[in-house]
Amino acid sequence: MPHISLKYKLSVFLILLTLLPTLTTGIFSYRVLLKSLTENTQKSEMSILENQMTNFDLAMHNFETILNDLVTSESTQGFLQFRKEKESEIYYSDLLLLTSKLDSLISQRGDSLNMAAFLWNDGDLPLIRGNSSGMNLAGDYTKREPFSGFLQADASIHWKVFTEGEEPVIYAYRTIYDASANANIGVALINFTSEYYKELLTRTMDKGAFYVLLDGEDRIVYTDGASVEEEAKLQELLWKEGAGGVLSGEKGVVSLLLEDRTYLVSFAESETNGWTYLYFNPLTNINESIHAITWLVLFVMALTAILAVIAAVVLYHYLNAPIGRLSKAMANMEKGILETRVDIPRRDELGQLGDGFNQMSEKIRNLISDIEKEQNEKRRAEIHFLQAQITPHFLYNTLNSIKSLARLKRTEDAADMTTSLISLLRLVNSGDEIITLSQELEYVKNYAAIMSFRRNRNFQIRAELDAGTENCRIPKFSLQPFVENSIIHGFSESGMENGNEEYQILVRAYFEESRLCVQVADNGKGFRTETIAEKPEENGIRFSHIGMANVEERIHLYFGKEYGIKVDSTPGKGTVVYLTLPGKDSDNL
């Protein structure tokens, strides 16, 4: 019915929605309603219970993760390797790391965790952090419960409850396996009192209701709201028939007679440690709620049927205008018009919906902007990381060359080479991302000087700078990679093997309209431009990890994609690199 107006659709829908349930409810008997409301009550109880067990499982999973980390972490494995070598420095170093880890764990989990410890099968001194006042570790603890049972367990995580005083103490533990000895050598364990479980499982209870937490052996760990007689009767029943005989499956709702009183018992089993949470709600509470709800539902349905037709017409006029504006705004959003806004000056749900739409539109715009900024910032950080790296082989070879000059007593050459290296290192460690052209040129000359010493060649840097270009700002290391390419590629195997031969690199800068143009030209052997590629095997002879593509990417990030680089090379005649940058000096950037 695509051509029927919204007014008639709403009217028919509301009439059917109200009159049909009213007539249907009058036909069905009270027992049908009783059954329906009982099922809804059970579903509500199970929903609350499942939410609580989800939180419980999440907490238990976190503790199991902590325990696994204690056993398998590098600090634990390192300590285990040297545990018998108590006189070695490595033993005390690993012991300090492990105790620091345990202290940090206790500090971070102090609201729930009492103690973390390592116990050993050979009876060695245990490693304990936290409150261990309830643990009797005097003498040979390996033969005393509960620790003897802990030490003989398998490699899975176990949960155990012991009564120490008035409150039960809960342990989670896992054995430690030594691969070199092919045997269990100890156990890592943590413990906490039932107070933490109280906070996890506390809920609002109906009159006469109570809840119970059972461990994996059907023992009561904690109860809230149950009388002593009810608790004793329930424990007796569980020991006699087992939880499997009283409850059916891992979760559900059953009726249970306890102390001459019938309870509707909702229960769920933990997926993490197999413990069971039970909520006992007296059936009388549910029946009282059902009777009250029955009369209320009948009255509301009758009143709703009378007002249905009037409400349909009024509601149409009330909803149509804002819904239409929202529909139009959503259509604009689908077209990609992110500036779309909708004005619904009301304080009801439709007004909130309009405000929510406006907020969503604004958030989408902001998210797109933030993503773009985040990507740019991430790339800037990566580039900054590359700028801060000098390839180790370059530094080793340079220092070795200085060492050789010193042995040959060429102290002035060694001093010049050291000065050039210091200048390059100063640039790497400087916080400036943008420097002047004259500064970049000075660093390039220092690099060429180092390479001249290292290769026993005369690499000459000649500069022709138009007036004003020397103060223009460019990204750091914009020229150095191209000079490096000239030295590594342009002047290798080029027929100029004579050590007295001059190897010329010309750096020319000039303004073209509002742009700064920089050319880096060499008289090397040249190459075919389609063969440009940065080779991983050259990392050992390069100054840094910054390549030609990296230079262009930085220019795009700082100044926009209208600027960049171009390479022109002819085999046998040399190579020219053209850089296009904004014509800004140090005062107005």
Image: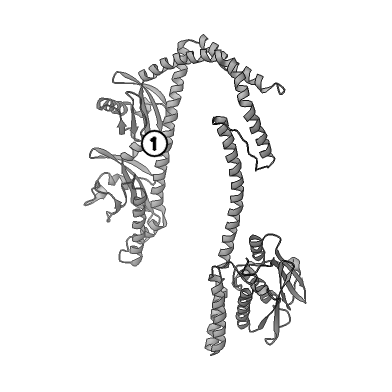
Q: Is residue 156 visible?
A: no
x and y percentages locating residue 92 in the rendered image: 33, 63
Q: Is residue 176 left or right of residue 20?
A: left
Q: Quadrant of the C terminus?
A: bottom right
Judge left or right: residue 463 versus residue 207.
Answer: right
Residue at (39, 52) in percent of width and height: 71
Task: Identify the residue position indicated by label 1 in the image.
Answer: 274
The residue drawn where x is 40% and y is 41% is: 59
In the rendered view, would you say 582 is above or below 36?
Answer: below
Q: Is residue 432 above or below residue 168?
A: below
x and y percentages locating residue 390 in the rendered image:
56, 71
In terms of depth relative to the viewer, which is nearer, 410 or 305? 305
Q: Which quarter of the picture shows residue 554?
A: bottom right
Give percent across and percent down for residue 410. 55, 89
Give the image location of residue 235, x and y in percent: 29, 28
Is residue 532 or residue 521 the one in the foreground?
Answer: 521
Quadrant hosting residue 41: top left
Q: Residue at x 33, y 34 (%)?
A: 217
When the figure is inspected, residue 287 is found, relative to residue 270, above or below; the finding is: above
Q: Is 232 located above or below residue 62 in the figure?
A: above
Which amino acid is tagged 1? Gly
Q: Which residue occupies the foreground of this view, 78 or 177?
A: 78
Secondary structure under tag 1 reads: loop
Quadrant for the N terminus, please: top right
